[in-house]
Amino acid sequence: MSISDELRRFALFEQLGALELQALSAVLIRRTLPVGALLFQKDDPGDTLLLIRVGQVRIFMRDADGNEITFRSYSAGQMIGEFSLLDRRPRSASAIVTAPLQLFVLPREAFLGLLQQRPLVGVQLMRSLAERIRYTTSYLERLYDALELLSNSEYEAAIRELTISADDDEMQQLISAFLTLARRAQAGDPQAGVPQAGDAQTRVTPEQHKNKPLS
Amino acid sequence: MNTLAAYAIALLIPPLAFYGIHALDLFKTSKPQMVALCALWGAFAAYPLAALINGELHSLIGYTLVVSLAAPVIEEMLKALVLFYCTRQPSFYYFVDGAIYGFGVGIGFATLENLAYVSASPSLALAVTRVLSTSLMHAMTSGIVGIGLGRLRRARAPLLPLLTMITAISVHVIYNNTVNNLTGVSLLLVAVGIGIGGAALIALQIVYGLRQEKQRFSETLGLANDVSPGERQAIQRLGGASITAILHELRQTFGEANVDLIERLLVTQANIGILENNLTSCVVSPRLRAAWETEIAQRQAESQALRHQLGRSVLSYLQDLFPTQDSAMWVDLQAQFAAHDPTLVHTFDMFMRLSGLAYKFAPEQLEAMALRLSRIDIFRHISLADLENLSRAVDVEDYADTTLLFDKGDDGDAMYLIERGAIAIYALDHGRNERHLRTFGVGQVIGDFAVLDGEHRSARARAQGDLSVMVLRREVFQMFIQSRPQVILAVLMVLAERARYTTGVVETTIQNLGNLARGDSASSIASAAVKDAALPVTEIAPDVSTLIELALVRCAARLALRLALVHSRDHAENAS
């Protein structure tokens, strides 16, 4: 597979033309890391975008007691640090290699140069960030509605509101956290009926609930 | 001693000649190794072969006939063989390089011939004049042949190489027939005459060749059959893709690396032209003028740097093809670049001027609008000058109460900034009945993300009261940003902050939901949320994270007791 084809696998770059991809691949740095290597640590300066070609990375933080909390894993075709690249904030969590890793690294300086030369790269990035914000916000809005229902003791309606599947790990975690809360609250309410097993089977695709009002 | 001096001069000629070629800055397109190959061929292949054949012919047709006729024909043919090879190489682009390679083979040939002559020379003076004139003659004749072969590569002129070959042989014949009867000054005069005549012939070919090239470029640009392009016509031709053809042609001439530089130079020049048009024809605030002037200065510096990289021969060629004073051609070129890759040139500015939109608002109005746009979150890092430029494309529209602005499922083609009145947002239930969601008021913006991603509308929007809005269409916004990396970066920074923020909200919410479910941290959430609830959320509607946290607080307050009950029950079950 050519580098251009490989780069096109990353959602951020899938719409770039041949020239943009060529310009991009010219400024990327290649890196390899073994299992167990720390890719970065919390509070490291984060001004590079990391594109995973092969392998896997686990993102984690330590809680007050020093226990590792895993947020999520990234694997081939996924990116880390697209925010840091732009706002230069330090890393908010640490990353450790869990399967032999091959990376493309895009430093901020190189990205700025690329943006000058091929502004389309920036327009693409803009679209994908906007889409991501919309996506996350639509879940949060839905969660808000569900929480409102829950605080009115409308357990069934609340559970139905958020019984959906997300194609994103983090959203899936958010959904399960809410459902756990709602079922526990229902179990603690002497006036509420016991939840039916079938209730949680209603599936809604992310596309459908993306159409929730965005304000 | 004399002979030694003559040898020295004969041997000095090649390095001097190659230094001359190099100093003329012509190596930007011709390949030094090709020139070397030609010189070596001239010296060690063409010359020995010619000497061999000439020697054989002596016994057949006699000395005089060989010198006066056979030798010129044979020598020119042999020298030309390597030129034929060179000009057929895929790396051969620029026809003038043919002349350079010709000089190379001529000098190489002459050097060996001179060495042979000097070894048998009667006097130093004769040796020196012979050495000079022979070098000049061989270089010129092969130069003429070379340029003919070079032009054959680009033009449909199969007779051209034949013509140049006949010319070269004729010059050679004249030289051979006069040189042996002359000495001293007259010999030098003949040599100089041949030099000047040959140079003139080559120059003539270059001029003629360039004129042909220009003709071809004009045809490609469509100028030849439409010489008075009104600018509106130019923009109508935006769909054409002939810049691709032009760049392809240039690639044939100069090769990949040079064409990249040339493209950047042409783009830079096109943008300078667009910005200068802005300055002369648009009335804007001093701030925007200053911004345009600064950008022109920056781009001129870029253009200088590019010119420096390109080298003289390519530049003079370009100046001939794209003369700065040919404004019709430049307008067309700008339009072509806009069509080829709209991120390259300021298409927005061209569009503003050609559509007449540039004259819609007075400078003070634009400044005021820019100020209002700067308060929109996604625009907050964009400079006021850029926002003022963008304001030129803003529409101010009025709507009566209950007018539909957009419906659920419509393309997100514009954003609205409320100036007066309000906009109500409705969800649609299955029976398509409207359910009021919320209302936006003066200073608030709707659909700001639409200009970024064009997503479908997720709800219905209606005017409420007497509505006046500033409308920014996605199309013009995209046109504006695509040639302005600094604006793209400014928007990206806000988006990154926001994306990071919403991701953070999701993470803390997951934790808070977990805590709440365990029934043991209700109070800590409540305290955190109270802090957030105290934030001034007056003018701008509360954002989603504040809403979530408020909802969490309400849940915590109402559910705490029940969750604690479940928790203690679980605890008791585990203990038993």
Image (cartoon, coloured by chain):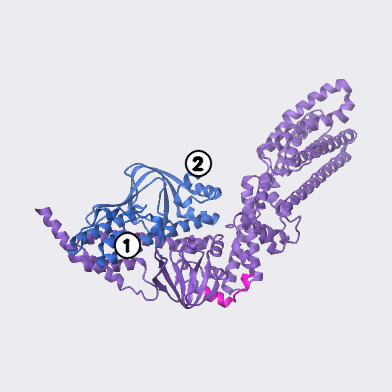
Chain colours: A blue, B purple
Choose top left, top right, bottom left or bottom right for residue B476: bottom right
Q: Which residue is mark 1?
A: A143
Q: Position of residue A33 (x, y in %)?
A: 37, 43
Q: Is residue A1 above or below residue B263?
A: above
Q: Position of residue B214 (x, y in %)?
A: 74, 51
The chain letter for the residue carrying disc 2 is A
- SS class of the residue under badge 1? helix
Specify the segment rendered in magenta.
Answer: B356-369
Q: Residue furthest front?
A: B431
Instruction: Report the front residue among B2 and A83.
Output: A83
Q: Residue A2 got which mark?
A: 2
**Amino acid on which the number 1 mark rests in the picture:** Leu
Separation of residues labelled 2 and 1 (CA atoms): 43 Å
In which quadrant will I find the N terminus of chain B?
top right
The chain letter for the residue carrying disc 1 is A
Q: Is residue B465 left or right of residue B97?
A: left
